[in-house]
Amino acid sequence: MKYVLEKRNYSYDNGIYRAIFRIVIPYGRGVGITVEDVLAIIKPQKIPDCEIYSIRPRDNISHRRTLEFLGDINKKGNPEDDMEGGSSSDELKQNLSILPTRDWHEYGTIQSEEDLGSVIYSWYMVIEAKDLQKISEQYESIVSRWKITDEETKRITKYVELIPLDNQQVKKLSTILWKSNDLTDMKNSTTMQYRYTGLGFYKKGVLQDNTGIPLGFDIYSSETLEQESKKSRVVINFNKRTKTRALVAIPRLSRMEDFRLDNGKEDNKAPLSSVVGQLIANDIIIGAKVNPKTGATKVPQVVHFSLNDFAYDLLNEQELLIRRASYYDRVDMSTVSINPLQPFGKFDEESELYSQFQDKIATIIDIMSDYTLDNSSKNNIRNAVQNTYAKYWSDKVDTRSLLTTNNMSFDTISSVINDIDRSLRLAESQNREKKVDRLDDISMSIKRAIGEVGRVLSSHTTFEPSKSRQVYYDFSRLSDRMKVVQFVNSLNIIISRMSKGDCLIIHGVDRIPPKVFADYAKKEVVERCEARGIRVVYLFDETMTGNGRSFIEYSNILYEDFYDSLDYQILGYTPSDSLPQLESLYRNSFNTQVKVDISASGAKGRVMFVDKSTMHNEVVDIARELPL
């Protein structure tokens, strides 16, 4: 340490001395390093009046880039060619000629697996104090403790070195914080992505998009500072990052005292997934785009389906809400009339709508039958819908269309009942008891649905979707069953009024059984939205706590691949026994620190943000004051 002081390898700024050291583990000594070893290295005991933190810049190297580098190695020779060393009785030196290629050799054996990549990284330790002598004492304390730790950890730490950076590098701290690692720099280390135990401990990667909206604070950004205002804010451009589909899942038990709904209920804490969803909506609303050719401004519309009773105007913390009809609207879905038989859309969608609406009516009746309909019953319903549609549309007659502008002339659900009743009477005359019972059950289910909320299902369409920039379709006054029915019933007409760049946000997706999405709703929410360029954000009030439907139950329905088919995921508390299942979704392992952070039930506002485009993984404490 005397060398550091003599060569002035430190900086002085605003009353604080700072020295930065590269953490060096000689190649070969780090084989088999564990998370416990990492903690012993980067979490040394502090002496009074000193601060220690580590910086671990790292870069994920893509599969393609790694293969390119492997090709370069094959052409130019192995990386260890430039390393110093010679023969020695020391086992480490004897193996220097083969150890540096360990990672590359391993990668070469599995290079056909395109999801795998490598990591290049370098680790630093920063010591700060108001007294320069304290830095010297802290250095000596760290090095000596590495030598006398328990035998198992000492196996690694006794070889670790702290190499001081020169004075100019110390002054330019930012060049280390945002350092881009170079594959050809032999001072850097490499490993496979799934083996990188340092992930989550580095101070570098605080996510701060150039423009965006603050979500909270990076929990690793400043472990020595307690005041939130001094921590690094995580700023996310949700408008830019939300390209097709995204998912937010935060369990009900994680609700925060800071966000409440003025809804007159005793338990009025707002679902935290919806609070984050509102943050996403706000950022999208202000993300208007100007057409460079016409100069026209395209302001995206955000449409909310509120299945969990959340509404922006009820949120006690909201400040950005503009209470004008052109900016915000909330529609009570228990009062609107939408004819479930009448499709809306474009003429080039007519053939698909003809088929989809047969599934739609079958799904609605299945819901009202407590999901007991068999395939024969569903086929009877489809036939009844086809018979009703026969007067409006045929793929052989161009002059007829399902997409009429005269809502009052379109048949209602009673036409399906009448057709089923005719089939029922025919079956009775033929003494077909099974079919009679089946058709009778179908008829009763429809009539029960009409009796429960007749206006919702039995009337002509009088509803016209709101044109406000942000609109909440509120399902809170409907029973649980009718909430699902009206959700299914309203998707088509609302999505038909949306356009490219708009965003559909579904609050409380877990209120809708996966079967309902698989049987019909997926065709609107996934397929039709994707075809129209409409962005979709799924908000779940559950992760994997066992207190409701998990987002995993919607796999291969709302998303094909959890990591690749979603732009990003924001996940809240996940029990430790469910972490292996979560890791399998990412096809990657979390390090111990991340596992502890997202399975800590006491940290209610803590979430993990994962973005596929940047491979960014951030653990965030949601701020108590959000730009809502």
Image (cartoon, rainbow, N blue to C red):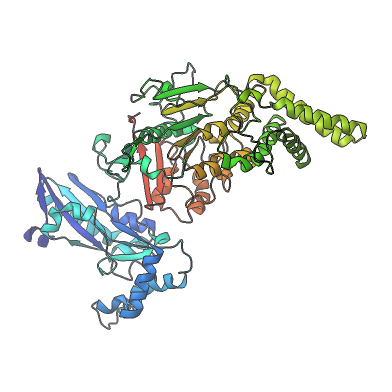
> Observer-nearest residue: 531 or 604?
531
Quarter of the rendering occupied by the C terminus: top left
**Quarter of the image with the N terminus in it:** bottom left
The number of numbered badges drawn on the structure is 0
Q: Residue at x 47, y 51 (%)?
A: 563
Residue nearest the viewer, comparing 423 with 389: 389
On the image, the x and y values in percent for residue 213 come to 32, 37
Out of 132 and 509, give the one closest to the viewer: 509
**Is residue 305 visible to the viewer in this orientation of the structure?**
yes
- The residue drawn where x is 32% and y is 59% is 59
Q: Position of residue 512 (x, y in %)?
A: 59, 34
In the rendered image of this protein, does residue 619 appear above or below residue 444? below
Q: Residue furthest front?
A: 399
Horizontal side of 263 relative to 102 (left or right) equals right
- Residue 218 in sight: no
Q: Position of residue 387 (x, y in %)?
A: 75, 35
Residue 311 appears left or right of 208: right
Decide: is 151 above or below 203. Answer: below
List x then y, in percent, for residue 160.
Answer: 27, 64
Q: Residue furthest top?
A: 264
> From the viewer's perspective, is residue 336 above or below residue 360?
above
| Horizontal side, residue 182 vs residue 458: left or right | left
